[in-house]
Image (spheres, coloured by chain):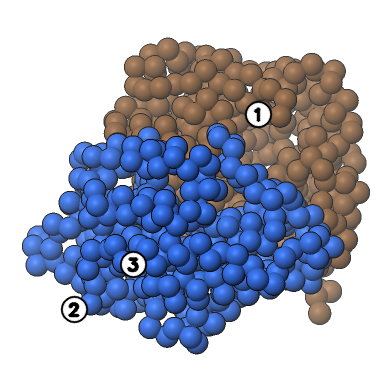
Chain colours: A blue, B brown
């Protein structure tokens, strides 16, 4: 029988929504903190398949989600392209900035995907450990979002430098996007070959795009990556999470040929049911702060979310990642709630 | 004859769009820096009507926009409510945080609007100085946005504490919102009485709201403020700028009874023309980074923006405020471009 998560991604309206949570493996879990300390640095944790695989499995063992997501980071692609990368406590990632088209010559484009081989090794390890009903998700950052980090040298704020480059030299900026499209395609193909059963593309900074440029720098690169993956792996579903896309959510799934769209916290689930769910499966979108609060506010909103999206394929998730102050028992209560929900029990 | 800016706000499709820019008075102007230095602190600048009026007038004298906006700050309301407030170089505003419902008792609710009398004095001074064809805009922050600063103690990031309070204790949070609705209504009524010809409500953090809560904490408080202003001043138009509202932009103007909606940089102008302009005038939304870039990219995008919105009432503006690195001559070129555009010259 098809895994529940993959059934929903293939367009089935399942008896209950499958559930996984963005950043389900992470700082809110004491067992994660222990492995993170053993690794010494976040980058080292991402580069060691034994530790990455362990961390990927932790929430599955503790809570029994319907899907595991590979533990890695969207900035491993800039790292493989030769950009210096460091993660500083309380500061987030720090990269050597790329300033303009001339800097592109410094990128080590050839063999970048090969330098990400440890990630494929992690995928192989996790695939061998997963419970039979749990699916494995591979992922990467979408080109625009990764470009904002590469150009801003870290968390992009309002992406001022990135926008100025794209506005003043669109052809040069397109070369960077093209490099990211190709590298990301190779990287994700390798993840699928290693055992990833679905792919998620994180366009975490879709909301920073300028309206007139949204199609060129978000829709089109993602469409190209998906077209390339579908050419080789037509049965592997692709989820896109264009966080903050606002009105651009409408029609997005069709434009990029995604099987599922992740909706952010701002999106009203009844709006998504009417405007988006006719095109694809919907993933999301409980507010992560509700999982910090827990109890009745969390479960009532979760119940409304499921009810709103019960007319079509739905993958239960948050509208953004689990945040560090989240009590693990609230995650447990949420998973139990969703797993005990049944279509035929609705009032 | 009606001022061009007020004609557009009343629903007229004008021969060219009137233009003003958010933060048109500000750090990118050397003459602003001089007055700011004289004031000693940003807060003092806001509290001195002579200096605030001077700063309000600077871009009008230099560029000849169609509207001036009162120089003040959305955090003057928390300040008038007794919250300690400081502006630190490079850090932004710092407020003594409000933590929960018990802290509301500390707020000096009675007479808060009276403590903002210097702002009305600024409005009176500017009204006496304006060129006859230039309109004067008063403004305030919308309750949700002001609440995020009051609770987070400064720039709200992801508004984690605010959301947790609203999720876990909606009745207590409603008391804070109610205080802000009333104080903001009094404050804006005083601005109108002093000579403001239009009002803008800045909901700068609409995008941080959770989908299920958007109506309760953004739409409803703004609707109440506008209803109160329209009761006393039916002919004074109200602009709302719900930055980051995404799909909630659709239907927003009708829900709050606004005369004009400000659209942020992410919104595609052709989408706004179809989905929003039937309900109200549209204000926006050139990307501020395009004004840093200047030249052909700025003017071509500005031309497309005007053309897209030429079928109805449009007020030309940016999608966010002018940023400090903007060359003043780019602002001049933009104002000249918009002021020389004519409907009958379109190709």
Mark pair 2, 1: CA separation: 56 Å
Q: Is residue B222 visible?
A: no
Mark pair 3, 1: CA separation: 47 Å
Q: Quick one: SS at disc 3?
A: helix
Q: Is residue B53 visible?
A: yes
Q: Which mark is residue A127?
A: 3
| Tag nearer the camera, 3 or 1 | 3
Q: Chain of mark 3?
A: A
Q: Quick one: SS at disc 2?
A: loop
**In this figure, which residue is indicated by the disc labeled 2?**
A1
Residue A82 coordinates in the image, percent (x, y): 70, 58
Residue B200 coordinates in the image, percent (x, y): 61, 41
Query: Along the line of sight, which residue is nearer the eye, B32 or A40?
Result: A40
Query: Along the line of sight, which residue is nearer the eye, B93 or B226?
Result: B93
Query: Along the line of sight, which residue is nearer the eye, B332 or B226?
Result: B332
**In this figure, which residue is indicated by the disc labeled 1?**
B92
Q: Residues within 10 Å of mark 2 (few under 14, many from 20)?
A: few
Q: Residue at x 79, y 16 (%)?
A: B40
Task: Kindly indicate the quadrant of the structure image that contains residue A172.
Answer: bottom right
Q: Chain of mark 2?
A: A
Q: Which mark is residue B254?
A: none
Q: Residue at x 30, y 78 (%)?
A: A11
């Amino acid at each position: 029988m098809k895994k529940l998560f993959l059934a929903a991604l293939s367009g089935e309206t399942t008896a209950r929504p499958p559930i996984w949570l963005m950043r389900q493996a992470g700082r809110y879990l004491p067992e994660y903190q222990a492995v993170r300390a053993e690794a010494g640095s976040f980058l080292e944790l991402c580069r060691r398949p034994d530790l990455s695989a362990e961390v990927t499995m932790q929430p599955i063992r503790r809570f029994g989600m319907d899907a595991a997501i590979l533990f890695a980071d969207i900035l491993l692609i800039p790292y493989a392209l030769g950009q210096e990368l460091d993660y500083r406590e309380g500061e987030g990632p720090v990269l050597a900035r790329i300033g303009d088209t001339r800097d592109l010559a410094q990128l080590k484009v050839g063999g970048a995907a090969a330098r990400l081989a440890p990630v494929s090794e992690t995928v192989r390890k996790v695939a061998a450990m997963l419970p039979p009903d749990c699916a494995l998700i591979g992922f990467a950052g979408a080109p625009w979002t990764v470009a904002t980090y590469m150009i801003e040298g870290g968390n992009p704020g309002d992406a001022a430098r990135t926008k100025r480059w794209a506005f003043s030299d669109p052809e040069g900026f397109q070369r960077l996007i093209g490099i990211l499209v190709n590298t990301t395609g190779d990287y994700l193909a390798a993840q699928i070959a290693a055992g990833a059963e679905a792919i998620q593309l994180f366009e975490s900074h879709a909301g920073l795009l300028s309206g007139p440029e949204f199609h060129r720098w978000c829709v089109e690169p993602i469409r190209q990556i998906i077209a390339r993956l579908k050419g080789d792996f037509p049965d592997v579903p692709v989820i896109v999470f264009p966080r903050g896309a606002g009105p651009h959510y409408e029609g997005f799934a069709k434009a990029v040929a995604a099987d599922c769209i992740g909706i952010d916290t701002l999106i009203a689930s009844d709006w998504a049911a009417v405007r988006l769910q006719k095109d694809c499966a919907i993933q999301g979108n409980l507010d992560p702060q509700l999982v910090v609060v827990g109890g009745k506010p969390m479960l009532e909103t979760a119940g409304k979310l499921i009810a709103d999206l019960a007319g079509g394929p739905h993958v239960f998730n948050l509208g953004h990642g689990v945040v560090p102050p989240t009590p693990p028992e609230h995650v447990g209560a949420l998973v139990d709630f969703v797993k005990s929900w049944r279509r035929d029990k609705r009032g």
